[in-house]
């Protein structure tokens, strides 16, 4: 066991509590060029130009809303934009119709209308969490509540839209001059719905003509992983090198985003979901990264020729995947050749099993790339998701859903009361904020709050600057377009970035266009910018107080739940013996590995906004911190688990007893991750590695698994960490 400990030295990094990049580094990374970002920015700018031309030419009411919708509902790919246009249009039409019906029944009865608005707000909060399509239900009910608030301004609502008796700006006459307030409000509701439909049609048409295919981003992401694996293999996969540093970065990044790209691609490429080739490719590319990382941690010189040959084949696979098998030569892959090279270090019980895992993964990737029609049924098993209804399975049992509804409802009531008591209708954005930033966890909510207020302030400053510096000189629509292009491009570039900053681009655009697009001519009104920022700040404060005080839900604890599920999945995998040791793929294993991969991806997704939460929300001091390094180290356990399951030699009774005991221990490890109980005792309950003289591979990898498990506990268990500090 001494040699095992030496081989595994440094395999698990020490935990760092304050490993946070600087703000400058973060912004530099987020503002950098990424595949498809320039294209998406140009499309957003084109949509802005088209909407301004249409709105100014035909004097469409609520022109700022028309322009802003392009930012709010546009995604970074053609698939999400198309589905958004279809579903968004249906929701807005239905919401407008239901609002009109609600107004018909309760317009003259505040005692009925206000309770109905409260019930709809409660329903929005509950359904957004309890339904499988909760976001659409939330938008629908929010739309009804927000539009119903127009009844509070019944005397002035007729001045929000203009009619025209001539061709000039001076010929505008407000609706209130020639129709009663009730009819003017109906006019407003219908026009706002029409504006949304126009904007959604523009989004659909532009993205149909030039939308960015998410399949391109999926291919680029996988090609980068193939390239990184190739470089690391060709340099010998030695630790502390630049190539292994890139591999570690990919391991920590995970493949959650690639899975998103795959799901989006399947919407516009239905053939992708037919054989699940894409998911199998993602799964095996991730395995290649982990195998290379595990090889580097062993730090051995043997097998260099084998690795270099692997690197050449992986590079060819990446080239074929990125450019298509029709445009590049066939992959120079020979399984027998690789097995012969691996036979040179067959007596090494550490490296040889990893070499076999390399060969198996490459066999799958080669088959899926060159012969997907024949290999897909055996290499890419169809993993059917459970049938989903309108509601989640625990919709009416989980207390978190009604709690979420109460938080949103209280936030809306408080903000609504502030707007009424202050007689300041311009800050109604505080009510909108309650719906938009009240997300499932405190971290997610705070993240969106920050993006919303920072984006609104930047957009307001740009709008006021445009009014002061350029507005007096504008004479026609072309001048207006030239002025707004730089800000639209800046907001579009941010909107086309990652989810960490994209919402700020939406808010920049909305605050800016609501400030400068008032009427159909030059404006000097700067109150809109001020009111919007004030409303957002009020809404943010109220929502945060509700989220932090009433049943707070921590993103870290959500990630903790997913990670515990991933660990339990490892327990199932370690006892799942490959039925045919010589086969490249075992269908039952691949199904379980896919579940493990999804659990790890869900953990990483949940952790994205955990840094925005207070420490008190993340659990007690005895609970381990759920961090990305811990997730990566848990994920690395899958390598020895896979090797142990795939060893060709039939296990004896001692080996079978050990894996059965380890399965139970993984269940205890999952419980420790969930509540932090008995961390020190968990180390003592690790089963002793059996001595199996005639099965060196299995015995050594039992030892490697034991060592990694102990190091994870020693590194991340707060009790062990405290004892180390006391010593």
Image (cartoon, rainbow, N blue to C red):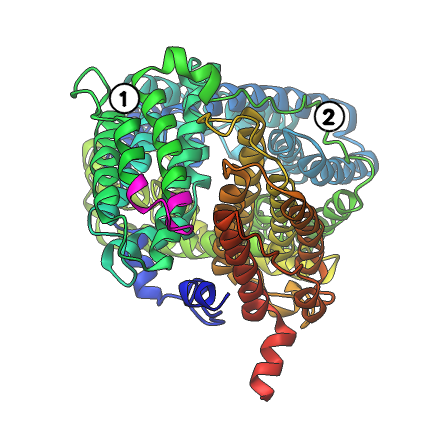
Q: Secondary structure at mark 2?
A: helix
Residue 249 at x, y = what percent?
Answer: 35, 53
Q: Residue at x 20, y 15 (%)?
A: 326
Kindly tell me whether residue 448 is visible in this rendering: no
Residue 388 at x, y = what percent?
Answer: 68, 23
Q: Is residue 604 left or right of residue 55?
A: right
The image quadrant of residue 280 is top left
Q: Is residue 694 above or below residue 724?
A: above
Q: Which residue is mark 1?
A: 210
Q: Is residue 37 left or right of residue 566?
A: left
Give the residues in magenta. 343-354
Q: Is residue 122 above or below residue 538?
A: above
Q: Secondary structure at mark 1?
A: helix
Q: Which residue is mark 2?
A: 102
Viewer-proximal residue, 46 or 134?
134
Q: Is residue 29 left or right of residue 454?
A: left
């Amino acid at each position: 066991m001494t040699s095992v400990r030496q081989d595994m030295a440094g395999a698990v990094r020490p935990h760092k509590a304050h490993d946070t990049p600087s703000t400058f580094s973060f912004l530099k990374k987020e503002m950098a060029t990424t595949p498809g970002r320039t294209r998406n920015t140009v499309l957003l700018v084109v949509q802005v130009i088209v909407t301004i031309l249409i709105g100014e030419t035909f004097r469409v009411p609520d022109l700022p809303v028309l322009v802003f919708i392009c930012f709010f509902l546009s995604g970074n790919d053609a698939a999400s934009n198309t589905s958004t246009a279809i579903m968004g249009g249906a929701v807005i039409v239905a919401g407008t119709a239901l609002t009109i019906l609600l107004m018909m029944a309760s317009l003259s009865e505040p005692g009925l209308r206000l309770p109905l608005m409260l019930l709809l707000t409660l329903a929005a909060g509950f359904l957004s969490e309890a339904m499988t399509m909760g976001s659409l239900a939330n938008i629908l009910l929010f739309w009804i509540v927000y539009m119903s608030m127009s009844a509070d301004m019944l005397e002035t609502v007729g001045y929000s839209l203009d009619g025209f008796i001539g061709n000039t700006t001076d010929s505008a006459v407000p609706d209130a001059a020639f129709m009663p307030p009730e009819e003017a409000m109906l006019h407003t509701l219908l026009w706002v719905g029409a504006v949304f439909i126009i904007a959604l049609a523009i989004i659909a048409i532009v993205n149909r003509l030039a939308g960015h295919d998410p399949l391109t981003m999926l291919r680029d992401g996988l090609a980068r992983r193939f390239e990184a694996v190739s470089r690391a293999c060709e340099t010998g996969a030695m630790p502390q090198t630049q190539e292994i540093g890139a591999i570690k970065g990919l391991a920590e990044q995970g493949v959650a985003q690639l899975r998103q790209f795959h799901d989006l691609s399947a919407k516009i490429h239905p053939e992708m979901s037919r054989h699940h080739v894409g998911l199998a490719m993602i799964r095996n590319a991730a395995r290649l990264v982990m195998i290379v990382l595990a090889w580097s941690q062993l730090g051995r010189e043997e097998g260099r020729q084998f690795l270099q040959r692997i690197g050449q084949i992986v590079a060819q696979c990446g080239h074929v995947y990125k450019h298509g098998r029709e445009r590049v030569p066939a992959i120079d892959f020979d399984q027998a050749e690789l097995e012969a090279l691996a036979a040179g270090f067959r007596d090494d019980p550490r490296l040889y099993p990893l070499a076999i895992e390399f060969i198996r993964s490459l066999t799958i990737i080669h088959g899926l790339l060159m012969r997907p029609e024949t290999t897909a049924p055996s290499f890419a098993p169809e993993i059917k998701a459970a049938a989903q209804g309108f509601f989640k399975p625990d919709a009416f049992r989980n207390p978190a859903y009604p709690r979420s509804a109460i938080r949103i409802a209280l936030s809306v009531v408080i903000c609504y009361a502030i707007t009424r008591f202050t007689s300041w209708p311009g800050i109604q954005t505080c009510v909108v904020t309650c719906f938009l930033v009240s997300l499932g966890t405190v971290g997610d909510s705070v993240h969106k709050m920050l993006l919303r207020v920072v984006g609104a302030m930047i957009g307001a400053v740009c709008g006021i600057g445009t009014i002061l510096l350029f507005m007096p000189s504008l004479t026609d629509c072309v001048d207006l377009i030239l002025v707004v292009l730089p800000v639209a491009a800046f907001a579009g570039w941010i909107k086309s970035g990652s989810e960490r900053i994209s919402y700020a681009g939406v808010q920049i655009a909305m605050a800016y266009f609501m400030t400068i697009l008032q009427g159909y001519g030059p404006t000097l009104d700067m109150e809109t910018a001020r009111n919007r920022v004030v409303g957002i700040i009020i809404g943010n404060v109220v929502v945060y107080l509700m989220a932090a005080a009433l049943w707070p839900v921590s993103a870290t604890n959500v990630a903790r739940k997913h990670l515990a599920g991933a660990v339990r999945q490892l327990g199932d995998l370690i006892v799942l013996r490959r039925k045919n040791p010589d086969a490249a793929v075992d269908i039952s294993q691949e199904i379980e590995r896919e579940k493990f991969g999804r659990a790890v991806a869900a953990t990483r997704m949940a952790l994205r906004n955990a840094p925005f939460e207070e420490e008190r929300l993340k659990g007690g001091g005895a609970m381990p911190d759920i961090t990305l390094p811990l997730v990566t180290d848990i994920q690395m356990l899958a390598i020895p688990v896979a090797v142990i399951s795939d060893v060709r030699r039939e296990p004896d009774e001692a080996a079978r007893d050990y894996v059965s005991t380890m399965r139970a221990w993984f269940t205890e490890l999952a419980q420790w991750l969930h509540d932090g109980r008995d961390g020190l005792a968990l180390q003592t309950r690790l089963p002793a590695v059996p001595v199996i003289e005639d099965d060196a591979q299995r015995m050594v990898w039992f030892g490697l698994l034991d060592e990694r498990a102990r190091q994870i506990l020693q590194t991340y268990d707060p009790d062990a960490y405290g004892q180390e500090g006391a010593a």
